[in-house]
């Protein structure tokens, strides 16, 4: 019976992996009931590493090259199995191959906005995304911590862990740097390099090397972006007086075109522009004491002036007020603005 079992066994004299499936990081050589011939050849290609595991214990690791498996080339396995130098029998061992090719164009990003504390805006929610690349460097660590004894371990199974780890690292980086969102967004390359340096030890702990990391976008959610845009616009316009004059001057020409508006009062587009400048100046002058907590004496709000003139013009149309009386009242109201 023992002789028949020996005859039925298949002996392996060539061990290699051709990496047919793209994205496979680890692959176990199919042993089943087979044993490895003493003196068998092991081929490890340029983009690979090979690992021998004896009864759950990591033994010898092979870099790219062509090897003849003997007690000399398998020192750890020889020690674990207590072989002597004359050992020539077939042996049993699990053999794993690992791909060391660079995994390019891997996506990372925040599936939902993350909350951070910004030194300029306070607590804000931030979005970010980009790409990164990595490759496997330590077969023993990757086997012990990630792939284990599985028949195959694919790149996509690792993506979620790496992506979430990078988002957590980015959050910590913001907190540690104390740099505002605006400054960080304006220096995405530098931010990417800082993230690369921070995440490389994390990848190394998995047996991987983080080769590159690119930040493609840093942004705020739409509602916060609108607020930021308003703030930027205010900074570009200048002080409040200039901003108010700008707003009023832009609104008056539209009112002058509308039937029943300033155009109905006999104020054309050109006059509307002049009127807008007067109103803007008056409102701007009123803003300064108001900002200091003081009443704006002798001033009238621009919208009140417009409303009053519209009412007076209606009285002219009804024949209650003459055109001369309307013109006189209009001049009086404009004086209060100036």
Image: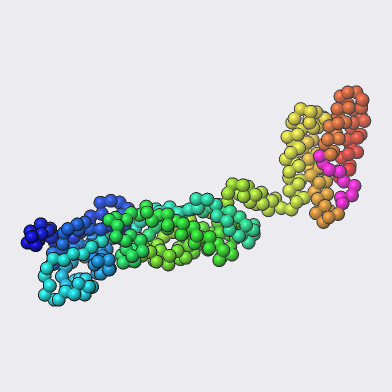
Taking the view exactly as shown, the residue that stands out farthest to the bottom is 85
Per the rendered image, the range of residues in magenta is: 295-303
Question: Horizontal placement of 161 versus 118: left or right?
Answer: left
Residue drawn at x 57%, y 56% is 115
Question: Horizontal placement of 259 versus 187: left or right?
Answer: right
Residue drawn at x 16%, y 66% is 91
Which quadrant, please, contains the N terminus? Answer: bottom left
Does residue 76 show up? yes
Residue drawn at x 31%, y 65% is 139
Residue 68: which quarter of the image? bottom left
Q: Position of residue 17 (x, y in %)?
A: 22, 57
Count of labels in the image: 0
Q: Magenta residues: mostly which secondary structure?
A: loop
The vertical placement of 78 against 170, above or below, is below
Q: Nearer the viewer, residue 95 or 149?
A: 149
Would residue 62 be counted in the magenta stretch?
no
Residue drawn at x 31%, y 66% is 140
Q: Position of residue 265 (x, y in %)?
A: 82, 30
The vertical placement of 309 against 99, above or below, is above
Question: Horizontal placement of 128 versus 314: left or right?
Answer: left
Would residue 299 be counted in the magenta stretch?
yes
Q: Position of residue 261 (x, y in %)?
A: 78, 31
Q: Nearer the viewer, residue 296 or 6?
A: 6
């Amino acid at each position: 019976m023992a002789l028949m079992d020996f005859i039925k066994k298949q002996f392996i004299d060539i061990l290699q992996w051709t990496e047919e499936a793209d994205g496979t990081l680890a692959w176990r050589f199919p042993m089943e009931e087979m044993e490895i011939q003493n003196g068998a050849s092991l081929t490890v290609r340029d983009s690979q590493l090979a690992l021998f595991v004896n009864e759950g214990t990591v033994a010898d690791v092979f870099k790219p090259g062509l090897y003849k498996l003997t007690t000399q080339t398998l020192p750890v396995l020889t020690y674990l199995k207590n072989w002597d130098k004359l050992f020539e029998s077939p042996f049993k061992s699990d053999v794993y191959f690992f791909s060391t090719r660079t995994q390019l164009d891997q996506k990372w990003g925040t599936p939902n906005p993350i909350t951070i504390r910004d030194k300029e805006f306070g607590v804000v929610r931030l979005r970010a995304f980009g790409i990164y690349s990595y490759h496997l460097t330590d077969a023993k660590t990757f086997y012990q911590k990630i792939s284990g004894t599985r028949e195959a371990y694919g790149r996509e199974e690792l993506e979620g862990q790496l992506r979430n780890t990078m988002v957590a690292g980015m959050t910590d980086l913001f907190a540690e740097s104390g740099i505002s969102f605006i400054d960080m967004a304006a220096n995405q390359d530098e931010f990417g390099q800082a993230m690369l340096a921070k995440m490389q030890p994390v990848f190394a702990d998995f047996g991987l090397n983080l080769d590159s990391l690119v930040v493609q976008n840093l942004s705020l959610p739409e509602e916060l972006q609108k607020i930021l845009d308003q703030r930027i616009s205010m900074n570009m316009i200048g002080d409040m007086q200039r901003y108010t004059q700008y707003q009023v001057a832009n609104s008056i020409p539209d009112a002058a075109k509308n039937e029943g508006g300033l155009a109905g009062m006999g104020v054309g587009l050109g006059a509307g522009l002049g009127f807008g400048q007067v109103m803007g100046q008056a409102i701007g002058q009123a803003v300064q004491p108001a900002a200091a907590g003081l009443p704006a004496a002798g001033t009238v709000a621009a919208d009140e002036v417009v409303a009053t003139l519209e009412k007076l013009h209606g009285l002219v149309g009804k024949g209650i007020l003459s055109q001369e009386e309307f013109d006189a009242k209009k001049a009086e109201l404009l004086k209060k603005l100036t």
